[in-house]
């Protein structure tokens, strides 16, 4: 036996078997083209010389021995920094199907070493819990069968828009019409909103593709989709373009990009769709935005008004001259005033057991145009793993409680609640969204699903990829490196955005038609949904079915 | 599916006319109930003062009957007339019926100088207090309406049989407006309060079909915390309350009703002369948008009658007649039964944008379209 001292075994020594993804390489198919090693975002594989023993068996001789050959093969790196992320780009570029990452079915050791240099794991993506979520388990079961001819999803006219903006009680509205009072601005939008993903988190090509797609949905398909910028500001040419009306501008605690926005106000051709003030994010409640230095390119630095290549962690709270209670009220009011009280302004918060208190504050704030609640399954470009996996509150019960609170006050039509966080996590985008709408949301925000469906994001909830934070996105979606983002064709992203929203529109009709609904979005139509889980049904006050 | 019939005429007529229309349309219901509303009352044996509120309902026991008497007396109402139906009890299906009552009262003197609003509220609260009293006593008292010039009868069974049991053919009771619904018991249990027409402060509607947007609408109406917005044993009751909310709370003209329950689309509003106002109205009343399929037939305190359809016109209804008398029914044969000798070529079936209004003078139909200018200065 060899002395252990002569073998390099440190506490952190790992073999490929200890990693979440194991590279399977078939030497007999490999042509040594090198595509896989050059495309790998983590440099997890390398070409290496290897020696193979060829036993020599000479039957007529008593001599025994071996011959050796040297060949070039693929070797998986075993350093944590180079751990394979399972993105599968190697398989995508291999001309011969000679290589692919396979998930390690055993538990893997990297779980215990994701804290190199004392820094806990940071990543992109969302809570790594896979399988059907609660929304996936909700069924639409109030089918109009007895007295009614069912509506025809293909031929009948449907009104699928929702209202974003503060709505007055009817009595106040009529009074203000008569006496010339201020009517808060509202927007009729498609209830599936492209959620806040910043210019900085997303690559320029991704952003352009989304914007093109959104414009196409609005102007050609007649689907009034809007998208939110996230906190990184907005490209100057968009601010001065007629497409600004499809954009929700987000302001968050870092205030990045807002110099540019404020300066552009006099030159705007149209008002933005809305202003979103981010107070919290479902993926990382209590944390501010985070753009890691890898992604702060020259362009991003200019847009955000910061030096290049520095981490940009936004503080968790807004810097304010006011008390915390007043800050929300004053910020909402200030932003409303900045845009001449013609643009809806609403806050975004993390789903929380205290969401109702925020909501009730907003009800009393005449400038608040709604509330966006982001649940624990929401995505992010960068956050600590602990925040993503273990901090936050699921969206369904939070939205339901808030909605029922408004119902008790008779104010459910006044403050629209938008829901986010895990909508379409398992691909059931229309189903998840409509379930939330029937629980009381006026609409939903969708980020991760759009990245997956429109741009082919490879991330999943089994730890695949999840490197949005590092700027090495293999599809060029969340990278600021031109070599990577040039892989993403904005026109093709736009095509996919249009396809996705056309499909959502059809699926929404397919859900609404059997329920006998077509004239208005079935917000709060809780009699139409059921779930085969008694506890969930009791909590959500919906039907228990089995 | 329920069947609906309404007749309105300058000359009071027997409610039996409308019951024959129900009989003509009998294929459409299962005989689970009848609701009958009469407005513009005339009694054979009493010269009725049209200001006296009439309390109508059913006492299911002697005790309930006595409580009713005591309650009204304590509240200061003076009984002026107590109509006694000539009953054929052998035709009554239900077992727990003691007395069908139609009683005219004089309001307490203290209300003489009160505003109309206060009087209206008092009548409603009195009715609700009696309803509550019945509910607290195991449902032994059912009160349908308490309002001047209005009588409502609701009962379980075949319409014509109910009419026969109350001897409605004998001309003792007549009215200028009569509306009836033959009920198809569908998703809710047989409950007298679930029977159309529904009534609130002089406003009444009845509906066929199903209200698929019932729960969100009900939730919103309950949030108004108006005492009369309760019940909802039937999903159609909200149509009455929306009309009440439109006319009495928002004080909007009748034309607004259609704009509230089935607003025009954004494209249509873009070219409407008052599109901006109506889009705002649609926003603020969004929770009152119905989805049908329904035909809504109603009457107002001034004897105006109306008919509107859901946005997809998934339930038909026809209106026909001539100067002086008009009929609305969910089936053409219903109109035929009520006014056979009319010019059928002039019958009208409203489209999705129409509100058919039969004004109190009953001279001609007003067919108002949502695309027409909206008749209110505030919308200008």
Image (tube, coloured by chain):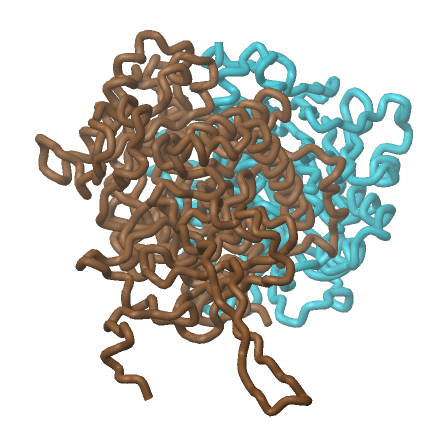
User: As rendered, which of A44 and A242 lies closer to the eye?
Assistant: A44
Image location of residue B102, percent across then percent down: 59, 50
Query: Farthest residue in the bottom direction?
Result: A62
Image location of residue B285, percent across then percent down: 48, 32
Q: Is residue B207 left or right of residue A46?
A: right
Q: Judging from the image, what is the letter of the chain drawn in brown?
A: A
Instruction: Say which residue appears at 73% left-offset and 20% top-offset.
Output: B365
Q: Is residue A265 left or right of residue B218?
A: left
User: As rendered, which of B243 and A287 lies closer to the eye?
Assistant: A287
Image location of residue A203, percent across then percent down: 42, 32
Image location of residue B202, percent across then percent down: 54, 37
Q: Is residue A178 left or right of residue B299?
A: left
Colour of chain B in the rendered structure image? cyan
Q: Is residue A245 above or below residue B169?
A: above
Q: Is residue A443 left or right of residue A60?
A: left
Q: Is residue A38 visible to the viewer in this orientation of the structure?
A: yes
Determine the image quadrant of residue B164: bottom right
Instruction: Say which residue appears at 42% left-offset and 41% top-offset.
Output: B107
Q: Is residue B127 visible to the viewer in this orientation of the structure?
A: no
Instruction: Say which residue appears at 49% left-offset and 23% top-offset.
Output: B252
User: As rendered, which of B55 and A528 lies closer to the eye?
Assistant: A528
């Amino acid at each position: 036996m060899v002395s252990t001292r002569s073998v390099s075994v440190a506490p952190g020594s790992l073999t490929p078997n200890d990693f979440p993804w194991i590279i399977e390489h078939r030497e007999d198919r490999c042509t040594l083209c090198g595509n896989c090693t050059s495309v790998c975002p983590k440099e997890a594989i390398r070409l290496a010389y290897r020696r193979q023993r060829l036993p020599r068996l000479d039957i007529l001789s008593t001599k025994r021995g071996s011959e050796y050959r040297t060949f070039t093969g693929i070797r998986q790196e075993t350093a944590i920094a180079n751990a394979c992320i399972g993105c599968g780009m190697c398989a995508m570029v291999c001309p011969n199907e000679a290589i692919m990452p396979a998930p390690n079915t055993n538990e893997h050791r990297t779980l215990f070493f994701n804290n190199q240099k004392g820094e806990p794991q940071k990543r992109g993506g969302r809570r790594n819990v896979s399988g059907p979520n609660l929304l996936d388990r909700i069924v639409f079961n109030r089918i109009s069968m007895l007295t009614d001819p069912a509506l025809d999803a293909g031929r009948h006219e449907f009104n699928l828009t929702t209202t974003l903006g503060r709505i007055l009680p009817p009595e106040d509205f009529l009074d203000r019409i008569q006496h010339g009072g201020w009517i808060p601005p509202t927007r009729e939008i498609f209830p599936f909103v492209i959620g806040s993903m910043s210019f900085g988190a997303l690559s320029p090509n991704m952003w352009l593709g989304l914007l093109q797609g959104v414009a196409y949905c609005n102007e050609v398909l007649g689907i009034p989709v809007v998208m939110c910028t996230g906190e990184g500001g907005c490209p100057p040419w968009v601010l001065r373009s007629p497409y600004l009306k499809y954009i929700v501008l987000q302001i968050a605690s870092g205030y990045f990009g807002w110099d540019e926005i404020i300066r552009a106000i006099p030159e705007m051709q149209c008002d933005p769709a809305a202003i979103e003030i981010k107070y919290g994010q479902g993926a990382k409640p209590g944390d501010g935005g985070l753009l890691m230095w890898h992604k702060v390119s020259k362009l991003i630095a200019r847009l955000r008004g910061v030096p290049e290549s520095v981490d940009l962690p936004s503080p968790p709270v807004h810097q304010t001259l006011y008390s915390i209670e007043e800050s929300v009220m004053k910020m909402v009011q200030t932003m409303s005033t900045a845009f001449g009280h013609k643009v809806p302004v609403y806050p975004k918060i993390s789903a929380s057991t205290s969401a109702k208190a925020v909501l009730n504050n907003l009800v009393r704030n005449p400038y608040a145009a709604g509330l966006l609640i982001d649940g624990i399954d929401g995505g992010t470009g960068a956050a600590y793993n602990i925040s993503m996996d273990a901090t936050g509150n699921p969206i369904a019960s939070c939205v339901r409680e808030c909605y029922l609170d408004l119902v008790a006050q008779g104010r459910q039509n006044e403050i629209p609640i938008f829901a986010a966080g895990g909508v379409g996590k398992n691909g059931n985008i229309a189903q998840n969204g409509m379930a939330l709408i029937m629980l009381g949301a006026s609409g939903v925000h969708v980020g991760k699903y759009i990245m997956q469906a429109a741009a082919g994001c490879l991330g999943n909830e089994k730890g695949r990829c999840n490197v949005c934070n590092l700027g090495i996105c293999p599809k060029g979606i969340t990278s600021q490196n031109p070599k990577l983002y040039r892989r993403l064709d904005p026109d093709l992203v736009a095509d996919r955005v249009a396809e996705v929203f056309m499909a959502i529109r059809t699926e929404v009709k397919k859900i609404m038609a059997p329920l006998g609904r077509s004239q208005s979005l079935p917000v709060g139509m809780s009699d139409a949904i059921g779930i085969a889980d008694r506890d969930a049904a009791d909590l959500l006050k919906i039907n228990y079915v089995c | 599916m329920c069947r609906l019939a309404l007749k309105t005429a300058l000359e009071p007529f027997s409610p039996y006319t409308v019951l024959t229309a129900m009989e003509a349309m009998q294929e459409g219901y299962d005989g689970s109930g009848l609701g009958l509303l009469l407005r513009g009352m005339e009694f054979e044996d009493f010269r009725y003062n049209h200001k006296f509120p009439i309390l109508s309902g059913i006492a299911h026991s002697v005790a309930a009957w006595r409580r009713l008497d005591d309650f009204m007396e304590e509240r200061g109402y003076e009984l002026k007339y107590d109509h006694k139906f000539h009953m054929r009890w052998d035709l009554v299906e239900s077992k727990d019926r003691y007395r069908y009552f139609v009683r005219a009262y004089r309001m307490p003197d203290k209300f003489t100088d009160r505003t109309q609003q206060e009087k209206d509220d008092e009548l409603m609260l009195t009715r609700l207090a009696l309803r509550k009293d019945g509910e607290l006593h195991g449902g032994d008292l059912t009160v349908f309406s308490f309002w001047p010039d209005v009588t409502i009868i609701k009962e379980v069974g075949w319409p014509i049989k109910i009419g026969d049991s109350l001897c409605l053919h004998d001309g003792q009771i007549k009215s200028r407006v009569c509306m009836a619904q033959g009920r198809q018991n569908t998703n809710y249990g047989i409950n007298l309060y679930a029977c159309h027409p529904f009534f609130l402060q002089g406003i009444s509607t009845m509906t066929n079909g199903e209200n698929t947007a019932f729960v969100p609408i009900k939730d919103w109406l309950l949030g108004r915390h108006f005492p009369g917005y309760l019940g909802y044993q039937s999903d159609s009751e909200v149509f009455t309350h929306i009309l009440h909310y439109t006319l009495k709370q928002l004080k909007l003209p009748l034309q607004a009703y259609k704009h509230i329950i089935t607003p025009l689309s954004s494209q249509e509003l873009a070219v409407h002369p008052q599109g901006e106002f109506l889009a705002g109205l649609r926003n603020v009343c969004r929770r009152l948008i119905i989805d049908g399929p329904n035909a809504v037939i109603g009457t107002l305190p001034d004897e105006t009658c109306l008919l509107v359809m859901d946005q997809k016109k998934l339930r038909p209804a026809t209106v026909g007649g001539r100067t002086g008398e008009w009929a609305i029914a969910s089936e053409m044969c219903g109109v035929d039964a009520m006014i056979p000798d009319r010019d059928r070529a002039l019958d009208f079936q409203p489209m999705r944008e129409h509100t058919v209004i039969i004004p109190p003078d009953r001279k001609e139909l007003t067919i108002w379209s949502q695309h027409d200018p909206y008749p209110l200065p505030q919308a200008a």
